[in-house]
Image (cartoon, helix red, strand yellow):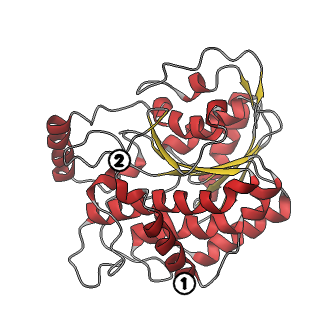
Amino acid sequence: MVNSESIPARDGFGHDSTADEVLAGINLAGLRALVTGVTAGLGIETVRALAAHGAAVTMTARDMIRGEEVAQTIRDSTGNPAVDVLPLDLASLDSVRRCADAYLSQHSDLNVLINNAGIMACPQGVTEDGFELQFGTNHIGHFLFTNLLAPALLKGAPARVVNVSSRAHHMAGVDFDDLDFHYRDYQKWVAYAQSKTANVLFTVALDKRLRGRDVRVFAVHPGVIETELSRHMLDEDRQMLAERGKRLGDMRQKSIPAGAATSVYAATAPELEGKGGIYLEDCRISAINDEENAAEGVRSWALDEASAEKLWALSEDLVGQQFHL
């Protein structure tokens, strides 16, 4: 998938490893990538790192003015002119379809798709199509977008899909009886956790469908990073997270370059060849951990194949389209 030059020893990656460190010695020339949500924070660093190592990268952004500014900054800083941007609002299925059509009209193949965009702990709301805002944006939008781009991924095989999840999935699974909080009180962190569990379940189901054709799928926890994703957080939220961190020891913050590392690692690491349908954190594969106060690992409910298939079928119903991959 990648061209190895003089790759240094690749053990020892961890919490503070950066995107450039996990790409050391890896030449991405000839690789075509797409990264969603790149007008701030981790998205910018993810695209910059990929472009700096030779990849051609398509960015997506809701704000095209800001997106074009970021793209030009990355072109200038990396010397790589092959960075472009497309408009995408994941809270609108029409926008998702337009963006996928635009990409496919310009490019026939895709080697890496990083579903990075998302929202977190926002006030209760719905998407353009009536889905609970966090579930609709973080899962449903990416579900449709990825499936629409599947022909390009298959043509670009060997290819990888990286779904940016979160350790917040520990807080809740998917409530199949009330995805949109019609019958239970809306809790913004439970809604966020549900959407992040959905990201992992989607990883399991998509990898099952595509692994036989050399497209592998990964879910990642990027870490705790202060970015624009935190824009809806209140003082009480920060206090809650600080108390959780003291109790579990799991809230040590990362820099933005370290926060982008696990996504980039999942997208490019040669040692992950032949693997997929798994969850990674700190640039390593995570083990199942269902302990109540677990500070790391992935919950078993997020890797459950029956739940992954149930979510896939439900997601197809919600977007009004079946995908026979």
Q: Which mark is residue 214?
A: none
Residue at 29 percent of width and 79 percent of height: 181
At a point 41% along the width and 43% down the height, the residue shown is 227
Image location of residue 230, percent across then percent down: 35, 50
Q: Which label is found at residue 167?
A: 2
Pick whichever, 86 or 249, lies toward us. Answer: 249
Q: Depth check: give the residue in front, 165 or 300.
A: 300
Question: In the displayed structure, does residue 142 sit left or right of residue 121?
Answer: right
Question: How would you rate the neighbour count of disc 1 (Cα within 10 Å): few for under 14, some for 14-19, many for 20 or more?
Answer: few
Q: Position of residue 90 (x, y in %)?
A: 55, 67
Helix, strand or loop for disc 1: helix
Query: What kind of residue is marked 1?
Result: Asp
Please give left or right for residue 109 compared with residue 283 in the image.
Answer: right
User: Where residue 317 is drawn, which disc sits there?
Assistant: 1
- What distance separates the C-alpha of mark 1 from that of mark 2? 27 Å
Q: Nearer the viewer, residue 166 or 227?
A: 166
Q: Quadrant of the N terminus?
A: top right
Going by the numbered disc 2, the residue's amino acid type is Arg
Q: Is residue 99 left or right of residue 255?
A: right
Seen in the picture, residue 321 relative to 118 is either above or below; the reply is below
For the point 68% across and 73% down, the residue is: 97
Which quadrant would residue 73 be assigned to in this image? Answer: top right
Of callouts 1 and 2, the N-terminal one: 2
Percent x, y of residue 209: 65, 63
Tell me whether the residue at label 1 lies in contact with that at label 2, contact meaning CB atoms closer than 8 angstroms.
no
